[in-house]
Amino acid sequence: GMSVEYDSLVNDVTLWNVAVERQIQVKGPEAEAFVNFVITRDATKIPVMRARYVILTNQKGGILNDPVLLRIAEDEFWFSISDSDLMQWLQGVNVGKGFDVEINEIDVAPVQIQGPKSYGLISDLFGREAADIPSYGLYAAQLHGRDVIISQTGFTGEKGYEIYLYDATKYAEDLWNAVLRAGEAHNLRVVAPAHHRRIAAGILSWGQDLDHETLPFQVNLGYQVPRKKEADYIGKTALEAAREQIEAGTPPYRTQLVGLKFAGNPIDDYAPDFWLVSDTADSDPVGYVTSPWYSPELETNVALAHVPVERTALGEEYWVHLPEQYAEVTGEPIRAEIVEVPFRPSVNPNTRERLKAQGLDAAV
C-alpha cells in the first residue's frame, strides 16, 4: 500500500511514470524573449542546460501553470507542464505578439527516479558525470542508443532525477525496461506519484493547492515575482499592484496557504474533496484543506490548507472537519495548529526556503 511505497521512496529508490508531464517546446530566434514574456521570473538568467521552477500567470496575476522550465539551447526551451494545459495558451499569446518562435508539444516523455539510492541508479545507467549534475542541472546522454535529457528534479523533496526520452512513443518501453533491470541492484520499486512526500516537502499541486484564480503571494510563491525584472510579462502590472497592497497591510485576497498539523486517524489515501476548516468547533467554515496526509516521521497528520489571511501566524489554531474514517469522534471536527512549511526538510531546499534563510523574498 501507500506506506510501502513511502518506505521505498525515503529509504531506497522509486520509478514513476510521469508521461502526463507533457513537454511544450518553444524554439526559434526569439525563444528567450517569448519565454521571458510569459513567465514571471527572468528567463535571460537561465543558462543553457539548466532548469528552473517557474510560474505563468494571466493578466490578473492568477497562476495558469507551475512547470519546470528546461533550457535545452540558446534558442530552445521546454515547459515540463503540471496539471493544466499550456500549449494553446502559449500559441494564443503569440498570435497577438508575433515572436519569431515555433510552439509545439514534442514527443518527449519523462520518468522520475526518486529516493536516496537514485544517485547510484543514475550512475549505473549513465555514469557519475550524469549523477553529479546540480539541482536543476541538465545532462544530455544516451541509453542503448536512445537520446535522453537527465535533470536533477522531482516531486518529492528527496534526492531524485527525471529522464526525458526523445521519440518516446517509439522507445518508452525500452527505457522503462532498462531502468527496471538496472534498478534491481538498488531495490527499485515502481510507485505512483508520491503525494505524501511532496506534501511534507511543501511542493504544490496545481488544481489542488492553487489554480488560475490564485495569486503567487497566497501560496508561498511571492519569490517568483521579482522586484528587479525590467522586461514586461503577462500579469506584471497586477502582481506588482498586489504586492503594494500586501505591503500596505491590505492584501487583495481572503485566504493564505499554510501548513497544519492535527490528530485523528492516520490519513493514508488521496483526499477526494476539500475538507472544511473553521475558527472554532461549532462555527461556520472559513477555509479548506487542500492536501492532507499522515507523516510517519512527525507521527501526526499534516496538510496544506487555505485559511483567512489575517490569521496565518505559527501556532494559530483552527478546527478541521475530517471525513468519518479519519475523525476521532464521528461528526466532530479536530483541533489543528499552523506550523512551518515544509513539514520535513528537502535534500535540495527550494528557492523560497533558500531566500527566506537569507532574508530575501524575490526570485533572481
Image (cartoon, rainbow, N blue to C red):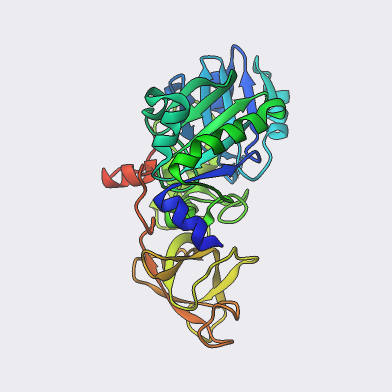
213 left or right, relative to 250: right
- Quadrant of the rendered image containing residue 29: top right
The residue most toward the left is: 358
The answer to whether any part of residue 39 appears in the image is no
Residue 145 image offset from top left, x and y in percent: 59, 17
The answer to whether any part of residue 244 appears in the image is yes
Q: Is residue 216 above or below residue 294?
A: above
The residue most toward the top is: 29
Q: Is residue 332 above or below residue 201?
A: below
Tell me the residue at 56%/25% (across/down). 35
Q: Quadrant of the N terminus?
A: bottom right
57 left or right, relative to 223: right
Residue 197 image offset from top left, x and y in percent: 46, 55
292 left or right, relative to 348: right
Tell me the residue at 38%/23% (across/down). 129
Residue 33 image offset from top left, x and y in percent: 55, 20
Tell me the residue at 36%/56% (across/down). 344
Tell me the residue at 32%/43% (across/down). 354
Q: Is residue 190 above or below residue 42?
A: below
Q: Is residue 36 above or below residue 73?
A: below
Number of numbered discs visible in the structure rendering: 0
Residue toward you, 43 or 121: 121
Q: Quadrant of the C terminus?
A: top left
Residue 83 image offset from top left, x and y in percent: 64, 45
